[in-house]
Image (cartoon, grey):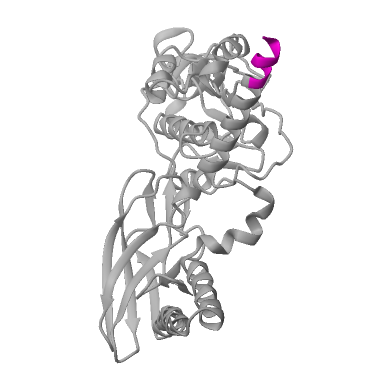
C-alpha cells in the first residue's frame, strides 16, 4: 500500500511539473537557446524551406517550386520593411513638461516620409512604459504614411508611474507586409515630460496637545515675531519700532519690546526609506511607489501650512522653504528619485529649531517610532507589522484604500514632536 501511495505521489509531481513546463513553454530548458528561433515566423519558414529543398532533391522536383515560393516570401518580408524604414524619420514631443501619475498629457508624433511611395504599418514601441510586460506593445500605430509627405499624429499619453518619459529611446518599427521581420529606427525626442508622484489631499496636521492647534499656526509655546503679544522683553538689535513697548520703555528708561507668538512647527524633516531591501516588489502598487506618494502628499500639505520641509532619502536630500516656494521642485526630485541606488542608510536629522520629523518606512525596517508611517509589505505580514509598528504613528496595509488610511491617522497627529535639541 505504501509503494502504491509513493508511486501515485511521484506521478502527481511529475505531471504537475510537466504541466508547468508546457504552460511556460520550457519543456527542455537546456534546448531553449537552440530552438528559440523556431518560435519566430521567420524560423518556421526557414525550416519549411529546408524541408521543401530536401523534398525537391530526394523526392519530387515539385519541392523546388515550394522552396522558391517560401524563399521569395521570406525575401520580400525582410527587404520591404528594411527599405521602408530607411526613408522615414520620426519626432516625438509632449504638449506639457509636467504631469502626474494617472493624468493624461497630449503627445505628438511627427513622421516624415521621404520615399515617393507610401509606407504602411508603422508603430512606436518602447520607452513609454515602466511595466516590463508592456514594453513590447505599441504606444501608437499608424496604418499608412503617404509618399513625400509629413504627418502629425496626436494621442493621449497617461503615465502609470512617476519618472521622466520617455524612459529610453523609443523605436519606430514596421514589419509590413508579412510580419516576418521587424525593422527598427530610433525616434528623435524633441521634448520629454516628467510625471510627478500622485498626491492626495490631507487636512491640517494637528498638534498633539490640542485639537484646535495646527502645525504652522502661531502658539504661545514658541516665541517669534507673529501672532498675539504674550509678554515684554528687552529690546534686541533689529526689532521693529512697532514692537516697542513704550510704557515699559518710559518706566525703565531703556528700550523694552513685546514678545510675540511663534510658529508651532517651523520646520519639518521627512525621512524616506528607499533602500531596496525594504521594498521587495516593483510596480505602481509597490511599497516604494506608495512611500514616495505619501512623502509628496505630506510635504505638499506641510508647505501649504507654512512649514519648511526637508526630504531625506538614502541617495540625497532636498530642501523646500516655507515661504515663496513652489512644490514643483520637490515633486521633480521625488519623481526622479531612483530607489535602485542603494546608498548608505542616513540617520534621522534633528533640528535645533521648532521641528517635526516624519519617518516613512516599511514593516521590514526595525526602526519605528511615534513619528513613523509604516507600510506593510503584504497581507500575510499583518501580525508581524502590528508588532513592528506598535510604536509607530500610522500603519498602512496594502489591502485597503491607502489615502483613506493615511487621513484617519493624520487627524490624530503624531505621537511624538520635538521642540528643541
Q: Could you tell me residue 391's position as x and y percent?
A: 60, 10
Residue that protrudes farthest toward the front in the picture: 59
Q: Is residue 210 above or below residue 290?
A: above
Q: Which of 264/412 is in front? A: 412
- Quadrant (top left/top right/bottom left/bottom right) for the N terminus: top right
Q: Could you tell me residue 25's position as x and y percent?
A: 54, 47
Determine the image quadrant of residue 85. Answer: bottom left
- Quadrant (top left/top right/bottom left/bottom right) for the C terminus: top right
Determine the image quadrant of residue 354. Answer: top right
Q: Magenta segment: does it hold 3?
A: yes
Q: Is residue 85 above or below residue 231?
A: below
Give the overall secondary structure of the magenta segment. Answer: helix
Q: Could you tell me residue 374's position as x and y percent?
A: 55, 21
Q: Magenta segment: does it hold 417?
A: no
Tell me if 77 is positioned left or right of 221 in this view. left
Tell me if 157 is positioned left or right of 209 in this view. left
Q: Which residues are magenta?
A: 1-7
Residue name at image x 46 percent, y 72 percent: 181
Figure disc tally: 0
Amino acid at each position: 500500500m505504501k509503494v502504491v501511495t509513493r508511486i501515485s505521489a511521484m506521478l502527481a509531481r511529475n505531471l504537475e511539473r510537466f504541466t508547468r513546463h508546457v504552460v511556460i513553454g520550457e519543456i527542455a530548458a537546456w534546448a531553449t537557446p537552440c530552438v528559440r528561433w523556431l518560435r519566430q515566423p521567420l524560423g518556421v519558414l526557414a525550416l519549411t524551406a529546408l524541408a521543401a529543398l530536401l523534398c525537391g532533391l530526394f523526392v519530387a522536383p515539385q519541392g523546388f517550386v515550394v522552396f522558391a515560393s517560401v524563399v521569395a516570401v521570406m525575401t520580400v518580408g525582410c527587404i520591404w520593411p528594411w527599405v521602408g524604414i530607411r526613408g522615414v524619420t520620426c519626432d516625438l514631443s509632449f504638449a506639457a513638461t509636467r504631469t502626474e501619475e494617472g493624468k493624461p498629457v497630449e503627445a505628438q508624433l511627427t513622421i516624415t516620409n521621404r520615399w515617393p511611395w507610401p509606407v504602411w504599418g508603422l508603430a512606436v514601441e518602447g520607452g513609454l512604459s515602466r511595466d516590463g510586460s508592456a514594453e513590447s506593445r505599441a504606444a501608437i500605430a499608424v496604418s499608412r504614411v503617404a509618399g513625400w509627405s509629413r504627418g502629425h499624429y496626436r494621442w493621449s499619453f497617461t503615465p502609470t508611474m512617476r519618472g521622466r518619459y520617455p524612459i529610453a529611446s523609443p523605436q519606430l518599427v514596421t514589419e509590413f507586409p508579412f510580419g516576418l521581420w521587424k525593422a527598427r529606427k530610433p525616434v528623435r525626442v524633441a521634448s520629454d515630460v516628467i510625471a510627478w508622484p500622485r498626491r492626495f489631499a490631507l487636512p491640517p496636521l494637528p498638534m498633539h496637545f490640542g485639537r484646535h492647534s495646527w502645525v504652522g499656526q502661531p502658539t504661545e509655546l514658541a516665541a517669534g515675531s507673529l501672532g498675539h503679544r504674550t509678554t515684554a522683553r528687552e529690546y534686541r538689535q533689529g526689532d521693529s519700532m512697532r514692537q516697542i513697548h513704550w510704557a515699559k520703555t518710559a518706566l525703565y528708561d531703556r528700550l523694552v519690546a513685546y514678545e510675540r507668538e511663534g510658529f508651532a512647527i517651523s520646520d519639518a524633516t521627512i525621512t524616506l526609506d528607499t533602500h531596496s531591501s525594504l521594498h521587495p516588489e516593483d510596480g505602481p502598487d509597490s511599497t516604494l511607489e506608495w512611500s514616495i506618494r505619501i512623502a509628496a502628499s505630506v510635504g505638499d500639505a506641510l508647505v501649504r501650512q507654512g512649514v519648511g520641509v526637508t526630504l531625506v532619502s538614502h541617495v540625497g536630500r532636498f530642501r523646500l522653504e516655507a515661504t515663496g516656494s513652489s512644490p514643483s521642485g520637490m515633486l521633480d526630485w521625488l519623481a526622479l528619485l531612483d530607489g535602485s541606488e542603494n546608498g548608505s542608510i542616513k540617520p534621522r536629522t534633528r533640528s535645533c529649531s521648532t521641528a517635526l520629523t516624519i519617518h516613512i518606512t516599511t514593516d521590514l525596517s526595525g526602526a519605528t517610532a511615534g513619528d513613523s508611517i509604516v507600510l506593510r509589505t503584504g497581507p500575510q505580514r499583518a501580525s508581524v507589522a502590528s508588532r513592528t509598528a506598535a510604536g509607530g504613528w500610522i500603519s498602512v496595509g496594502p489591502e485597503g484604500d491607502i489615502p483613506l488610511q493615511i487621513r484617519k491617522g493624520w487627524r490624530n497627529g503624531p505621537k511624538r514632536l520635538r521642540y528643541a535639541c
